[in-house]
């Protein structure tokens, strides 16, 4: 997949802002996916630094996070679950891991599906200013509301940040870099 694959501006009627958001998402998704090129499942699951992170796990986490935030855009804070959910911490930790039976191909396919859904929401959402209150959690400002636009910018930032993590992990595996 290249950075420009997916819906094109000519296929849907959208504002320049929406086209810019989609292009930014596609570029950072490409950089993240590119860290996994030519890796085996074993390499994708390898922890090559002192952290618990692996390339496959980072991609899995980004897909999981993007899906949850798009659910928030569509359904509000109920989509995010509560911080008092006893299984939330474990599910979050596992979102960074390749679990037994998971494959890099499966993780990438799931990420592609999440990306297609997000692109469709960006293209068709009636109003990027529509907002919801953030769920109560220690990491969110109390009483804050995020618009769809703010959530999408957050998804771009998350993807970019984690693409950098994956690049470091990949370089430690075999010297390959996302760029160069």
Image: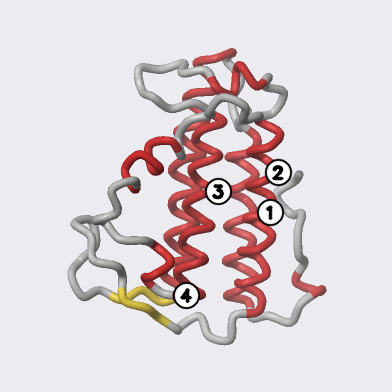
Image coloring type: secondary structure
Q: CA distance from mark 1 to mark 3?
A: 9 Å
Please state which of the two labelled residues, at mark 4 or mark 3, is closer to the viewer.
Answer: 4
Residue at 59%, 23% in the rendered image:
44
In the picture, measured across the screen, residue 55 lies left or right of residue 146, that is: right
The part of the image, by quadrant, that contains residue 51 is top left
Image marks 1 and 3: residues in contact by CB distance under 8 Å: no
Position of residue 16 measured from the top left corner of the image (x, y, whole percent): 63, 76
Image marks 2 and 1: residues in contact by CB distance under 8 Å: yes
Check the picture and name the quadrant holding the C terminus: top right
In the picture, measured across the screen, residue 54 lies left or right of residue 146, that is: right
> Which disc is residue 109 wearing?
2
Q: 17 or 82: nearer the eye?
A: 82
**Category of crowding for the residue at label 4, using alpha-carbon neighbours closer than 10 angstroms: few (below 14), some (14–19), many (at least 20):** few
The residue labelled by disc 1 is: 113
Position of residue 92 measured from the top left corner of the image (x, y, whole percent): 38, 43
Q: Earlier in the sequence, mark 2 or mark 4?
A: 4
Q: Earlier in the sequence, mark 4 or mark 3?
A: 3
Position of residue 82 measured from the top left corner of the image (x, y, whole percent): 30, 61
The residue labelled by disc 3 is: 63
Q: CA distance from mark 1 to mark 4?
A: 19 Å
Q: CA distance from mark 2 to mark 4?
A: 24 Å
Rendered position, 116 above or below 36:
below
> Which disc is residue 127 wearing?
none
Q: Earlier in the sequence, mark 1 or mark 3?
A: 3
Residue at 36%, 61% in the rendered image:
81
> Which disc is residue 75 wearing?
4
Check the picture and name the quadrant holding the N terminus: top right
The secondary element bearing badge 4 is classed as helix
């Amino acid at each position: 997949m290249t950075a420009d694959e997916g819906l094109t501006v000519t296929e849907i009627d959208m504002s320049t802002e929406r086209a810019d958001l989609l292009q930014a998402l596609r570029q950072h998704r490409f950089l993240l996916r590119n860290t996994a090129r030519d890796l085996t499942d074993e390499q994708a699951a390898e922890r090559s630094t002192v952290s618990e992170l692996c390339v496959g796990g980072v991609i899995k986490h980004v897909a999981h996070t993007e899906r949850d935030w798009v659910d928030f855009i569509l359904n509000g804070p109920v989509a995010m679950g509560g911080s008092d959910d006893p299984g939330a911490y474990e599910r979050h930790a596992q979102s960074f891991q390749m679990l037994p039976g998971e494959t890099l191909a499966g993780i990438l396919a799931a990420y592609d599906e999440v990306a297609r859904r997000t692109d469709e929401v960006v293209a068709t959402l009636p109003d990027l200013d529509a907002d919801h209150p953030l769920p109560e959690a220690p990491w969110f400002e109390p009483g804050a509301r995020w618009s769809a636009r703010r959530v999408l910018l957050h998804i771009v930032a998350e993807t970019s940040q984690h693409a950098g993590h994956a690049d470091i992990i990949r370089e430690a595996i075999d010297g390959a870099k996302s760029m160069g």
